[in-house]
Image (cartoon, helix red, strand yellow):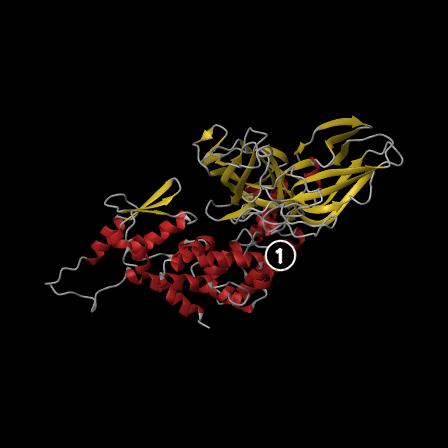
C-alpha cells in the first residue's frame, strides 16, 4: 500500500507542468527563454472568446475554448476534430471549467476543492483520458481520514489547508477518542491550540481542560506556549466548584495564573450565565461567551446582506448570504420563501461562524416545502447564514405533469428563535422529527368538500378518490391519526393509507383498483396492500413515482379513531383513499375522514 508521503508526492506532481525548468537550470547568453511568459499568455486565453474556435454549450451558458491548446490531449483531439459547437448536456459546468484551467495553466491546487467538486473533476479527467491529472486526484481521495491516521495527517499539514480543516472537523466529531490517544499530545503547539480553539468540539469543557493539563504537564513547551494553550480553554463554561478546586490547584502548581486572574475568570462565568442557559458543551459557546446572544422566543434578526436579496435589502441573486453582526445561540428559524401559497420550494441552508467554513443545516434540494417554514434543530452558535439553490415550483399540487423549476432570486424573510428543544432528531440529510413541530405544521389538503360535526372537521371525497395531505416540509414520521364517522353502530369503512417523500409523485392517481400500484405506478399486485418497500429518493435517473402503503383496511372495516402506525420514515405527503362502506343503512357514495395533526 502506498504511504501517505508517497501519495502526497504524487499529488504534488500535478505542478510539474508549471515547474518544468530547463535542464541544468541556467541558459547561455545566446538562448532566449520565454517559456514562463508563453505560459502566461496561454493562461490569458482561458475562457476568453478572443480567437476561440470551439464552443461548449451548457444549456443557456457557453464556454469558449481553443482547439490548438485543447488538442494536446489525444481524446480532446478526436472530440474536436470537425466540431465548432459541442453540446455538454449532463456535464457539470463548474468542474469542466476547472478541467480547462488545468489544460491552459498546467496546474491545479487540489487542496482548493471540496470533496464533491474534486470528485466531479476526477470523473471528467477519467472521461477524457487525462491520466496525469486523474492519478493524483485518486491518490488524494484515497486519503481517508480515520482514527488511525487523523493526528498524523493533521500534524503534517498546515492547520488552514483543506486536509488540515478536514482533520479538524474529524477531531471535532470524535473529540473524546482523540483526547485519549497518546499521539495527540505529540502535536506542536500551533496544532494543539487550533484544536482547543475549535468551536465544534463534541465534549464538555472539563474534558478540554483535562486535555490541556496533560499537554502542558507532558511537553517541554515554554511558558508562553503553555499560556497559549490555556487561553484556548473556555473557563467560563466550567462549573464554579471545578474552577475553585481542580483549576486553582493546577495553576498554583504550574504558576501559570494569579488569584486575580482566577477571580476574573469566575466573574466571566457569572456574566455568561446572564446571557444564556447553563450550556457546557463547547459547540454551543464561543471564547467571548458574554458576546453570544441567546434568543428568547422568536426574534427578527438584524442582518447585513453580503449577497443576494432578502425583503427589500440587497441585489437579486440565486444565493443569499447574511451577516447577523453578532454571535447568536439559536435552535430554530422561521423562513418565508415567497408569497405564493400554491408554490412549493427547494433550497439548501447553511450556517457559519466566520463566513468561510460552512455546515449544512437543512438540505431540501431533494424535497419540496411550502412557502413558510418552521425549521428546528439542535442548539448552535452562528453568525452567518447562507441559503442557496433556491427554486420554486408554481401550482405544484395542480400541475403534476409538467413541474417547471424556476430559480428564486429573492427571499422574503428569516426569523431566528431559541426555544426549549423537545424531541428533535437529526438525520443525515438534516431532516427533522419533532412532536411539537408536527402539531404546529401548516398543511395543504386536496378533497372534494368538508363538513363539521361534533367538533370534528371531516374531509370528504368520492370512493376511490384520495384525500391528500401535503406537509409543509419533510418530516420523520411513524404514526398517522385518523377519525372516521361513527354515527351508526354497525357501519364501517374500508380504506387505504399511503405515504411518499417523492416531490414529483402523482397526488391523486388511484392505487385502489384491481391493478394495485404499491410503489411505482406500474407494478401490478393481486395482494391487498402489496409489499412494504423502503422509500425511494429522487435521483437524476428517470423519475419513479412512489407511494408506500402503510395502512391497508380494504378487507377489514374501521370506524371512530384509528391510529395507523408504521416503521419511521420520511414523509412529505400522505393520502387516504376510501374504497367501500359496510353494514350501512343508508346508501353512501362518499368517504369522510378527520386527519388529526
On screen, residue 99 above or below 452: below
Q: Residue at x 76, y 26 (%)?
A: 451
x then y, percent, for residue 264: 57, 48
From the viewer's side, name the closer residue of 73 and 570: 73
Q: Quadrant of the C terminus?
A: top right
Q: Is residue 3 visible?
A: yes
Q: Which residue is mark 1?
A: 206
Q: Splitting the image into 4 quarters, where does residue 594 fall?
A: top right
From the viewer's side, name the closer residue of 330 and 42: 42
x then y, percent, for residue 241: 67, 53
On screen, residue 51 above or below 218: above
On screen, residue 355 above or below 220: above
What crowding class fits label 1: few (fewer than 14 Cα within 10 Å), some (14-19), or many (20 or more)?
Answer: many
Is 575 placed left or right of 562 in the picture? Answer: left
**Given the current orientation, which residue lies at the most extreme left position?**
30
Q: Splitting the image into 4 quarters, where does residue 106 fall?
A: bottom left
Q: Residue at x 26, y 52 (%)?
A: 67
Is 345 placed left or right of 586 in the picture? Answer: left
x then y, percent, for residue 533: 67, 52
From the viewer's side, name the closer residue of 331 and 41: 41
Secondary structure of the residue carrying tag 1 is: helix
Amino acid at each position: 500500500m502506498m504511504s501517505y508521503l508517497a501519495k502526497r508526492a504524487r499529488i504534488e506532481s500535478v505542478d510539474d507542468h508549471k515547474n518544468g525548468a530547463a535542464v541544468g537550470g541556467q541558459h547561455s547568453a545566446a538562448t532566449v527563454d520565454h517559456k514562463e511568459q508563453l505560459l502566461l499568455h496561454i493562461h490569458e486565453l482561458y475562457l476568453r472568446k478572443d480567437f476561440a474556435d470551439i464552443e461548449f454549450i451548457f444549456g443557456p451558458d457557453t464556454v469558449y475554448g481553443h482547439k490548438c491548446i485543447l488538442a494536446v490531449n489525444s481524446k480532446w483531439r478526436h472530440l474536436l476534430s470537425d466540431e465548432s459547437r459541442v453540446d455538454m448536456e449532463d456535464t457539470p459546468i463548474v468542474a469542466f471549467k476547472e478541467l480547462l484551467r488545468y489544460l491552459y495553466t498546467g496546474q491545479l491546487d487540489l487542496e482548493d476543492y471540496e470533496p464533491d467538486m474534486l470528485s466531479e473533476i476526477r470523473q471528467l479527467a477519467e472521461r477524457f483520458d487525462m491520466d496525469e491529472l486523474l492519478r493524483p486526484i485518486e491518490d488524494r481521495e484515497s486519503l481517508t481520514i480515520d482514527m488511525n491516521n487523523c493526528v498524523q495527517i493533521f500534524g503534517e499539514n498546515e492547520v488552514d489547508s483543506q486536509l488540515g480543516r478536514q482533520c479538524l472537523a474529524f477531531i471535532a466529531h470524535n473529540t473524546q477518542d482523540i483526547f485519549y490517544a497518546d499521539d495527540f499530545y505529540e502535536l506542536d503547539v500551533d496544532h494543539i491550540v487550533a484544536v482547543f480553539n475549535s468551536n465544534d468540539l463534541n465534549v464538555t469543557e472539563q474534558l478540554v481542560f483535562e486535555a490541556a493539563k496533560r499537554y502542558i504537564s507532558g511537553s517541554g513547551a515554554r511558558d508562553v506556549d503553555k499560556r497559549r494553550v490555556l487561553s484556548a480553554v473556555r473557563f467560563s463554561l466550567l462549573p464554579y466548584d471545578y474552577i475553585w478546586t481542580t483549576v486553582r490547584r493546577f495553576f498554583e502548581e504550574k504558576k501559570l495564573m494569579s488569584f486575580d486572574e482566577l477571580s476574573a475568570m469566575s466573574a466571566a462565568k457569572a456574566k455568561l450565565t446572564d446571557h444564556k442557559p447553563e450550556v457546557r458543551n463547547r459547540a454551543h459557546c464561543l471564547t467571548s461567551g458574554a458576546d453570544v446572544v441567546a434568543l428568547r422566543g422568536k426574534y427578527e434578526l438584524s442582518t447585513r446582506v453580503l449577497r443576494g436579496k432578502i425583503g427589500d435589502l440587497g441585489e437579486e441573486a440565486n444565493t443569499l448570504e447574511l451577516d447577523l453582526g453578532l454571535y447568536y445561540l439559536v435552535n430554530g428559524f422561521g423562513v418565508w420563501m415567497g408569497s405564493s401559497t400554491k408554490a412549493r420550494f427547494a433550497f439548501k441552508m447553511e450556517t457559519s461562524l466566520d463566513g468561510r467554513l460552512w455546515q449544512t443545516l437543512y438540505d431540501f434540494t431533494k424535497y419540496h416545502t411550502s412557502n413558510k417554514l418552521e425549521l428546528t434543530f439542535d442548539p448552535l452558535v452562528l453568525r452567518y447564514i447562507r441559503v442557496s439553490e433556491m427554486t420554486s415550483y408554481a401550482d405544484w399540487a395542480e400541475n403534476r405533469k409538467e413541474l417547471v423549476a424556476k430559480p428564486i432570486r429573492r427571499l422574503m424573510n428569516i426569523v431566528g428563535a431559541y426555544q426549549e428543544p423537545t424531541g428533535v432528531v437529526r438525520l443525515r440529510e438534516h431532516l427533522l422529527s419533532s412532536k411539537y413541530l408536527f402539531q404546529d405544521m401548516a398543511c395543504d389538503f386536496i378533497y372534494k368538500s368538508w363538513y363539521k360535526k361534533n367538533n370534528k372537521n371531516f374531509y370528504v371525497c368520492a370512493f376511490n378518490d384520495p384525500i391528500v395531505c401535503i406537509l409543509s416540509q419533510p418530516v420523520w414520521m411513524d404514526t398517522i391519526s385518523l377519525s372516521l364517522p361513527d354515527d351508526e353502530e354497525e357501519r364501517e369503512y374500508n380504506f387505504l393509507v399511503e405515504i411518499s417523500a417523492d416531490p414529483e409523485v402523482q397526488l391523486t392517481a388511484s392505487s385502489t383498483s384491481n391493478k394495485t400500484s404499491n410503489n411505482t405506478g406500474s407494478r401490478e399486485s393481486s395482494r391487498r396492500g402489496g409489499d412494504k418497500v423502503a422509500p425511494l429518493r429522487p435521483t437524476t435517473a428517470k423519475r419513479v413515482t412512489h407511494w408506500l402503503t402503510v395502512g391497508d383496511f380494504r378487507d377489514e372495516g374501521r370506524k371512530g379513531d384509528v391510529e395507523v402506525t408504521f416503521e419511521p420514515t420520511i414523509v412529505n405527503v400522505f393520502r387516504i383513499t376510501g374504497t367501500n362502506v359496510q353494514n350501512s343503512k343508508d346508501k353512501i357514495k362518499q368517504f369522510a375522514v378527520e386527519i388529526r395533526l
